[in-house]
């Protein structure tokens, strides 16, 4: 796939929908509430760990809610809370309650590793959370512990069941596949959840980040599908409305839906409708780039909502056509580490 062309003659709008120079309308905002995480996944952060953001640099819940409300006034309808691991930030149910009450927000979701989620699932649902995605890269306890550097698989499985009981459905499982590390889990992951139609397994291509050692082998989504096709009949479902970048297929033998997210070999930059707000207020209009100054400084400098809205439009107008990791076979790395970028 090629990157989208800039639309000649298109002028930056001063009101209405959030449109970039390539004609893409943005309705989806990912909000990182912390860069901290209780796991140390091998593909997400270096073995030595990271220097966490100072707490005073993090956006407060009130600042996050204000930014989201301004985005909602410009057409953002879907918000996803991410980290790091979002549940390590105390009082997160309060933020969920604030965001779920914002006019215009139609879908409020969270991506979590599940370690702390099970006992809070009902509270999150009552606060207004609609759905969760759970990061789970193996259903083998030993391999899971190695990948996460100490994670407990059973706690994640308990979180999945707690989310189902709390009606946070469908529960989507995110499995980052790395050749030679956990690619043996593609079929195993499907089989483990074959009896739960409200659980959707999604396989994600490994994305290289500059802060993490990259001595790992990328496995293209086409090869992941081929692994499943050796055992199942796959029927294409395509890209579901509101389902993000995942291309879904049905396994005819079980009726399961499975998804593939391929930011490297089958990139979806041409249809990108998302923005990322980092925990310290930096806005990424593209996963590969961070914008400065931080929205935190703009808010704390006394900007009005109208001024913030125009600043956001200016930021979006500077959005690039897409990331470059796919242009030379994926050897270029994204800046930073996923845990600080915000998933």
Image (cartoon, rainbow, N blue to C red):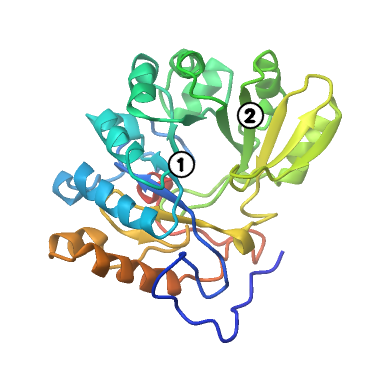
Task: Name the image quarter holding residue 4.
Answer: bottom right
How far across and how far down the image is residue 67, in percent?
A: 29, 54
Q: Residue at x 71, y 29 (%)?
A: 257
Q: Which residue is mark 2?
A: 201
Q: Residue at x 50, y 59 (%)?
A: 26
Quadrant of the image containing the C terminus: top left
Tell me how far mark 2 sits from mark 1, CA to CA: 23 Å
Q: Which residue is mark 1?
A: 106
Quadrant of the image containing the N terminus: bottom right
18 vs 172, nearest the viewer: 18
Residue 188 shows in the view: yes
Label 1: how many Cα within 10 Å (few below 14, some 14–19, many 20+): some
Asked which secondary structure carries label 2, the reply is strand
Label 2: how many Cα within 10 Å (few below 14, some 14–19, many 20+): many
How far across and how far down the image is residue 240, in percent?
A: 67, 42
13 lies left or right of 24:
left
116 lies left or right of 41:
left
């Amino acid at each position: 796939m090629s990157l989208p062309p800039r639309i000649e003659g298109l002028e930056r709008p001063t009101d209405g929908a959030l449109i970039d120079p390539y004609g893409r309308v943005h309705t989806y905002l990912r909000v990182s509430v912390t860069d901290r995480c209780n796991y140390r996944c091998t593909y997400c952060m270096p073995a030595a760990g990271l220097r966490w953001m100072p707490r005073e640099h993090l956006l407060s819940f009130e600042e996050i809610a204000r930014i989201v409300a301004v985005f909602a006034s410009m057409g953002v309808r879907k918000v996803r809370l991410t980290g790091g691991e979002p549940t390590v930030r105390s009082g997160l149910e309060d933020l969920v309650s604030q965001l779920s009450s914002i006019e215009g927000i139609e879908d409020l979701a969270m991506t979590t590793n599940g370690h702390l989620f099970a006992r809070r699932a009902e509270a999150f649902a009552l606060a207004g959370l609609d759905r969760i995605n759970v990061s789970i890269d193996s259903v083998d306890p030993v391999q899971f512990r190695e990948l996460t550097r100490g994670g407990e698989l059973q706690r994640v499985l308990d979180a999945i069941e707690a989310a189902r009981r709390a009606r946070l459905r469908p529960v989507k499982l995110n499995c980052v596949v790395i050749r030679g590390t956990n690619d043996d889990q593609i079929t195993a992951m499907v089989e483990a959840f074959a009896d739960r139609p409200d659980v959707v397994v999604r396989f994600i291509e490994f994305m290289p980040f500059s802060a993490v050692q990259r001595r790992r082998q990328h496995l293209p989504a086409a090869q992941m599908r081929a692994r499943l096709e050796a055992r199942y009949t796959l029927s294409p479902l395509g890209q579901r409305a509101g389902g993000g970048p995942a291309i879904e297929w049905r396994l005819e033998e079980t009726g399961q839906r499975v998804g593939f997210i391929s930011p490297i070999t089958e990139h979806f930059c041409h249809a990108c409708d998302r923005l990322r707000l980092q925990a310290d207020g930096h806005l990424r209009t593209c996963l590969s780039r961070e914008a400065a100054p931080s929205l935190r400084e703009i808010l704390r400098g006394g900007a009005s909502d109208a001024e913030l809205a125009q600043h956001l439009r200016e930021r979006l107008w500077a959005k690039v056509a897409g990331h470059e990791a796919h242009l030379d076979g994926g050897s270029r790395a994204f800046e930073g580490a996923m845990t600080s970028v915000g998933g």
